[in-house]
């Protein structure tokens, strides 16, 4: 089956744009995760998490 060169080029360009968009999403998500880790999540830790449970 033959594909017209213009259609083949269009398909290749669409695929390339899709790959670039996926890479951008991953890069932005990673940058946001790193930023959140540096500044904290914005919510204070639960007081229950820091309490010690007495031994029985």
Image (cartoon, grey):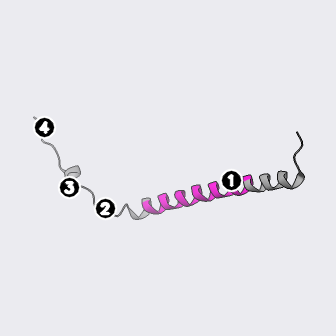
Evaluate if marks 3 and 2 touch, with contact meaning CB atoms under 8 Å apart: no
Indicate whether residue 29 is drawn in magenta.
yes
Residues at marks 3 and 2, CA–CA distance in whole angstroms: 12 Å
Residues at marks 4 and 2, CA–CA distance in whole angstroms: 30 Å
Image location (x, y in percent) of residue 33: 48, 58
Disc 3: which residue: 47
Image location (x, y in percent) of residue 49: 23, 50
- Element under label 2? loop
Disc 1: which residue: 19
- Element under label 3? helix
Disc 4: which residue: 55
Image location (x, y in percent) of residue 7: 83, 53
Q: Sequence order check: which comes first, mark 2 or mark 1?
A: 1
Left/right of residue 28 with respect to residue 56 in the rendered view = right
The residue drawn where x is 12% and y is 41% is 54
What stretch of residues is rendered in magenta? Answer: 15-36
Please tell me whether mark 3 or mark 1 is closer to you in this view. 1
Evaluate if marks 2 and 1 touch, with contact meaning CB atoms under 8 Å apart: no
Q: Looking at this view, is 49 or 18 the one in front? A: 18
- Element under label 1? helix
């Amino acid at each position: 089956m033959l594909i017209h060169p213009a259609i083949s080029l269009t398909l290749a360009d669409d695929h390339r744009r899709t790959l670039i968009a996926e890479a951008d999403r991953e890069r932005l998500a990673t940058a946001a995760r790193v930023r959140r880790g540096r500044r904290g999540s914005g919510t204070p830790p639960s007081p229950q998490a820091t309490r010690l449970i007495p031994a029985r």
